[in-house]
Amino acid sequence: MLLDLSEEHKEHLAFLPQVDSAVVAEFGRIAVEFLRRGSNPKIYEGAARKLSVSSDTVQHGVEGLIHLLTESSKLMISELDFQDSVFVLGFSEDLNKLLLQLYLDNRKEIRTILSELAPDLPSYHSLEWRLDVQLASRSLRQQMKPSVTIKLHLNQNGDHNTQVLQTDPATLLHLVQQLEQALEEMKTNHCRRVVRNIK
């Protein structure tokens, strides 16, 4: 699977062939550091002074490298696919090898960092439900008012929490139809591709 880089990312990466391979390796270190600790404008300014370019140019170069490494790591693309993806950028063979080595050295760590950044959402544990029907009240002798009470047990970070929901059968039926429609949508090729890229 090849990476599909936008024109903007190609422009950001176009700065890399203009600098020495040691600088590209340093940009790779900065990119991984950026993922670990966040952005540091002082690093961009210091590198820009040494290279006699604007700090925006350095920042765009590092951000392009970050995007290349994170997308490659997310998709866990093979060495050959990475080389083919970088080959279309028109870089020299030495630079392509350096980028490949950066990717191979850092992909596990980048995947670990990305998994830590992912939101930890609650997961389903169990469900209890009860159907209540009010047949009469003091003011109305003959009425039929059904309601469904749902007790949803969830797990999050090893903790159990419970949500109690109450609704009428018509709303519950509509909710079930919407969820079934969403499940059918997940079977389409487009959704499968999106889910594969998220992982």
Image (cartoon, rainbow, N blue to C red):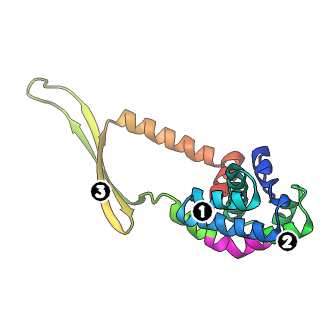
Which mark is nearer the camera, 3 or 2? 2
> What's under tag 2, amino acid-wise?
Lys
Residue 126 locus on image (x, y percent):
37, 60
Outermost left residue? 138
Kindly report the distance in space between the C-alpha atoms of the residues bearing marks 3 and 2. Answer: 53 Å
Residue toward you, 17 or 140: 17
Kindly report the distance in space between the C-alpha atoms of the residues bearing marks 3 and 1. Answer: 38 Å
Q: Which residue is mark 3?
A: 162
Which mark is nearer the camera, 3 or 1? 1
Instruction: Specify whether residue 5 is in view.
Output: no
Kindly report the distance in space between the C-alpha atoms of the residues bearing marks 2 and 1. Answer: 22 Å
Q: Residue at x 85, y 65 (%)?
A: 83
Q: Which contiguous range is marked in magenta?
A: 101-109
Q: Main secondary structure of the magenta part?
A: helix
Residue 34 - label? 1
SS under mark 1: helix
Which mark is nearer the camera, 2 or 1? 1
Pick whichever of labels 3 and 1 is earlier in the sequence. 1
SS under mark 2: helix
Instruction: Specify whether residue 21 is in view.
Output: yes
